[in-house]
Amino acid sequence: MTSMLSQLQITAAGRPSVIGLFSARPSSAIPAGFAKVCVQQGWGVEKTWKQLNDASRDWFESDNGAYIYYNKGDGQWWIDEPGGNGVFKAAAPSHAPRCNHND
């Protein structure tokens, strides 16, 4: 399943590095920050990505390398900063991150 969303935007967050426009990426592409953390931890990059990110699901990336992906291990969407460290996570439908609005 690919996402019906082609882009999403984070307009406010406690971390400036995760604010911005995020574009859909195919699951076959691995975020650079994710790969960096795997290498630092001694984990196989492709193996770990396949364990956590469903091969049929898009993920989202900003121009600075921050990314959002659905972690099938815990059933939550993760927002990671460009270096690959997790910043936020939230339960939401697996097909797309939940949007919260302050009206």
Image (cartoon, rainbow, N blue to C red):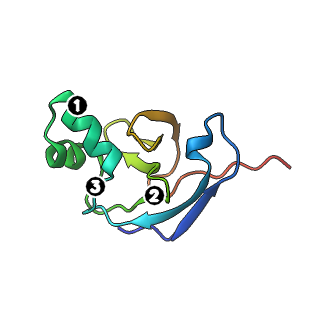
Disc 1 designates what residue? 40
Disc 3 designates what residue? 30
- The local secondary structure at tag 3 comes to loop
First along the sequence among labels 2 and 1:
1
Q: Nearer the viewer, residue 56 or 26?
A: 26
Spot occupied by residue 95 in the image (x, y as percentages of width and height): 46, 59
Q: Mark 2 or mark 1, which is nearer to you?
A: 1
Q: Amino acid at mark 2?
A: Glu
Quarter placement of the N terminus: bottom left
Q: Mark 3 or mark 1, which is nearer to you?
A: 1
Q: Rounded to the nearest whole Å, what is the CA distance between mark 3 and mark 1?
A: 15 Å
Q: Rounded to the nearest whole Å, what is the CA distance between mark 3 and mark 2?
A: 10 Å
Q: Residue at x 47, y 48 (%)?
A: 66
Q: Amino acid at mark 3?
A: Ile
Disc 2 designates what residue? 61
Spot occupied by residue 19 in the image (x, y as percentages of width and height): 62, 48
